[in-house]
Structure formats: C-alpha cells, structure tokens
C-alpha cells in the first residue's frame, strides 16, 4: 500500500493485494485511516474473460489483413 496526495490535497491510496483478501474489509480499513481518500487497486477484475463469436471473428479478420 502506498499513499500520495493529489493536486487538491486529497489522499490517493494505491493498494496491491495477493492471495485471498477480503477487499470490502480492506476498503473499509483504508477509508477509516484515510477519510475521503481515492482508493486504487481494489477493483474486482474477472479471472476469465469470455470472448463471443463475433469478437473472435473480428480478431481473426484482423490477423488475416496483417499477413
């Protein structure tokens, strides 16, 4: 976790987690320590991205143009 301050003096907290972490509890702890802070790095990111058929066709078409 690192803390910096934006142009307006508002704290910006950057968080990087590893393993199984209760993100909501961590967010509440950070908010308690740094009221009004912008918190970065606790957004949930999907582990799997589903590619639909149209997207896959577009990707293949772009590959064909580059050859």
Image (tube, helix red, strand yellow):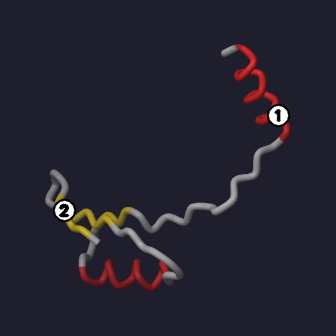
Location of mark 1 (residue): 54
Location of mark 2 (residue): 4
Does dot 1 land on a helix, a strand or a loop?
Answer: helix
In the picture, the disc for residue 39 is none
Residue at the image position 77 percent from the left and 27 percent from the top: 60
User: What is the CA distance from the residue labelled 1 to the residue labelled 2?
Assistant: 42 Å
Asked if the residues shown at circle 1 and circle 2 are in contact, with their CB atoms under 8 angstroms apart, the answer is no
Residue at the image position 48 percent from the left and 78 percent from the top: 23
Q: Is residue 45 above or below residue 58?
A: below
Observer-nearest of 10 and 47: 47
Where residue 39 appears, x then y in whole percent?
Answer: 35, 66
Observer-nearest of 40 and 64: 64
Does dot 2 land on a helix, a strand or a loop?
Answer: strand
Q: Mark 1 or mark 2: name the one nearer the start of the chain.
A: 2
Q: What quarter of the picture does the N terminus occupy?
A: bottom left
39 relative to 23 in the view: left or right: left
Residue at the image position 73 percent from the left and 30 percent from the top: 59
Observer-nearest of 66 and 52: 66
């Amino acid at each position: 976790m690192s803390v910096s301050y934006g142009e307006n003096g508002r704290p910006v907290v950057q968080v990087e987690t590893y393993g199984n972490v209760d993100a909501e509890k961590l967010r509440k702890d950070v908010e308690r320590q740094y009221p009004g802070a912008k918190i970065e790095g606790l957004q949930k990111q999907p582990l799997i991205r589903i590619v639909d058929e149209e997207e896959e066709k577009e990707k293949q078409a772009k590959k064909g143009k580059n050859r």
